[in-house]
Image (tube, coloured by chain):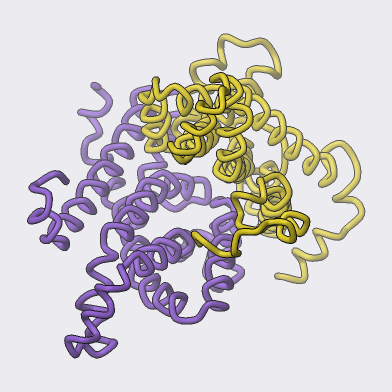
Chain colours: A yellow, B purple
Amino acid sequence: MIVDILQWLVSAEEWSGDGGILVRLLEHIAYTFMVILLAGLVAIPAGLWIGHTGRGRWMVTVANALRAIPTLGLLFALTLVLLPRLPGASAFIVPSIAVLVLLAIPPILSGTYSGVESADPAALDAAKGMGMTGRQVLRSVEIPIALPLLISGIRAAVLQVVATATIAAYVGLGGLGRYLIDGLAISDYVSTAGGALLVALLALALDAPFALLGRYLVSPGLTGRTPRALRQTDPLPAGGTA
Amino acid sequence: MEWILDHLDDITSLGLQHVWLSGLPLVLGLVISIPVGWLATRARWLRGVLITGSGLLYTIPSLALFVLMPLVLGTSILDPLNVVVAMTIYTIALLVRSVVDGLTSVPDEVARSATAMGYTSVRRFFGVDLPLAVPVIAAGLRVAAVSSVSMVSIASLIGVDQLGDLLIDGFNREIPGELVAGILASVLLAVVFDLLIRLAEHTLTPWRRAQQGSSA
């Protein structure tokens, strides 16, 4: 069985053509990027605003309560509602993308908001004391401090989208989910399992860059990794709060 | 509403299936995560390996994991065991981290006083460390419970019966009542699981009530 699946994965016919693995893989990646971009455009500014002003926390509560709704139910309900109202092929794609965006918002929103909240009040006071405006405090103090949690929020959202896009193949979305859903429908276990392996590998591959991103984007002052140049000139003893 | 009242028997029996498929993995996952988490607090290198490893397991999409389980377990694709094992893996992936965080949050002076009072390491673990870690572990378990109830519905796509059947059937036959019933029953179950975990946490941490009154 495993040999059959591996054979399916490497066979040239499966990779080429309109419904080939390469096309499905690129579709899956394209959906994921588009959804994360849309969700980020909504969730990051909202999260920054909530964290910075301390207002509108109910949005985080509402977004988190959304998580109790079964993904499958949300997907089916929205598709059923939108299906008769949209023309042609968009009737299948728009509801799926909308649900994916809806599911990607809560992790990014709470990551951004709790990231900004995690800023030490003393650091904020110091920044204000130095004469920084609210906008400057946000840009040069709160956002850098929020980055680690913001990144892990996006990371969680990416995994959620990759997984849910697979399921959305049931209501007609393209991508790697097609192999799973179509394979299950005709009881062809080889292509089902092959598709499952590809989705799992894609999830791992998309997750990996975030670990690296964390290392490069996050201010060294926050990670405890002091840059070499600073370490030589800094008269303070190393260590301190670990 | 009418649909729900007419099909109360079906909803109940699918709901019970759902309780098994999502509840049993939570219990199994908790029982496995405690010794694994304990091991991770003991050895630093093991901690990195276990936390990264369980994090990687969590990245695998649920439908993919359900579908791949027969390859690993040698079961048939329709076997509910696939779902139970897959959900147990997810629970472990989430909880190992909570157990480690919980155990390391025990204040040093508390651990040292217990040792000074003559607690053996086993007795200290069960009598001091683990009880003090309960709030952190319970928080992790609540997250796991909500996602478990939601994820189990997806098992309907591979033909394992539970509340997700209502969602698929309601969608395919365009019966909004059935779809709504499936969503409501699932949300209700998630709320019940959440309450049960909070109740267990409340019972297991009597000192918190003594400290701050009943504010749980």
Asked if A91 appears above or below A62 in the picture, the reply is above
Asked if A2 appears above or below B3 in the picture, the reply is below
Asked if residue B104 lies left or right of residue A112, the reply is left
Residue B37: percent from left, percent from top: 42, 72
Foreground pick, B201 / A194 = B201
Asked if B195 appears above or below A168 in the picture, the reply is below
Q: Residue at x 52, y 46 (%)?
A: B157
Asked if B90 appears above or below A89 in the picture, the reply is below
Foreground pick, B76 / B51 = B51
Answer yes or no: is residue A192 visible.
no
Q: Residue furthest front?
A: A235
Q: Quadrant of residue A171?
A: top right
Q: Residue at x 66, y 43 (%)?
A: A177
Count of all numbered marks drawn on residues in the image: 0
Asked if residue B215 lies left or right of residue A132, the reply is left
Image quadrant for the N terminus of chain A? bottom right
Q: Residue at x 63, y 20 (%)?
A: A94
Q: Quadrant of residue A53?
A: top left
Asked if residue B132 lies left or right of residue B176, the reply is left
Asked if residue B115 lies left or right of residue A53, the reply is left
Residue B189: percent from left, percent from top: 27, 43
Foreground pick, A202 / B35 = B35
Residue B115: percent from left, percent from top: 24, 85
Q: Quadrant of residue A19?
A: top right
Foreground pick, B88 / A115 = A115
Answer yes or no: is residue B122 visible.
yes
